[in-house]
Amino acid sequence: MRFELLVFDWDGTVFDSTGSITRALQAACRELELPEPSDARARHVIGLELSLALRHAVPDLPDERLPSLVDSYRRHYLAVDRDIHLFAGIPELLETLCASGFLLAVATGKSRQGLERAFASSGLGRHFSGSRCADECFSKPHPQMLEELMSEFAVPNARTLMIGDTTHDMLMAVNAGVAGLAVTYGAHTRAELAQVNTLACVDNVEQLALWLKRNT
């Protein structure tokens, strides 16, 4: 096995949630009569810690209005959270990887509460030996999430692979000295992902499974 520890991003990689996140962010801005970010700008900040993401999405946001925007976003997102689904093929892929002896982990821009809710609703929590969230570590692309996971499982960076759908994920991998595999079916486009040093870009879960079978 070339890799031992496979670290997955969640939103846009495992969970088909990028559209819901984008719409919730835009709805929160409309509710508070703030400038509404374009789809592209809203999608670009997915994966960052929430407060940081909102500051990037609404660059002129006054500091005193940030808590209200955070609260509004969370309400809009939670209103549709139960209707968000896994990407087709993800449960089978994770089952196969676990059976093959890989250690699986999650590094996500979600809060711990949000990830635990997603684990419970999806039933996938049992597949992951560890996880790090944005309210426990520095936000991506800081390498802390990956560094802590590698330390927890005593796996060196040469044996670790980061799998994600954003440049934030891939830059985190670069900063941690870890290989990155990009998926193009989430928040960031292939053109954006191609600007970062990755092993490959795959366009769907079927291609992801095939790449992992051939290269890990």
Image (spheres, grey):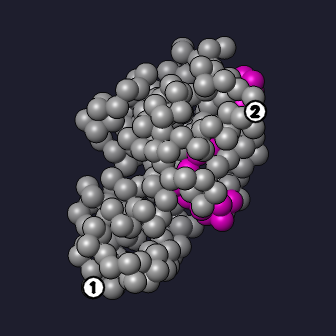
Q: Say if residue 168 shows up in the picture.
A: yes
Q: Is residue 104 magenta?
A: yes
Q: Which mark is residue 55?
A: none
Q: Nearer the viewer, mark 1 or mark 2?
A: 2
Count residues near mark 1 (Cα–Cα under 10 Å), then give few for <14, some for 14-19, many for 20+. few
Task: Name the amino acid type tagged 2.
Answer: Phe
Q: State the residue at coordinates (50%, 74%).
A: 74
Magenta range? 96-116
Q: State the residue at coordinates (62%, 31%).
A: 6
Task: Name the amino acid type tagged 1.
Answer: Glu
Q: State the residue at coordinates (28%, 39%).
A: 192
Which quadrant is the N terminus positioned in? top right
User: Residue 30, how many percent across, how many down?
Assistant: 29, 81
Q: Which mark is residue 153?
A: 2
Q: Earlier in the sequence, mark 1 or mark 2?
A: 1
Q: Is residue 99 magenta?
A: yes
Q: State the residue at coordinates (53%, 33%).
A: 176
Residue highlighted by disc 1: 33
Count residues near mark 2 (Cα–Cα under 10 Å), then give few for <14, some for 14-19, many for 20+. few
User: Residue 96, how many percent across, how many down?
Assistant: 68, 28
Residue closest to the eye, 211 or 69: 69
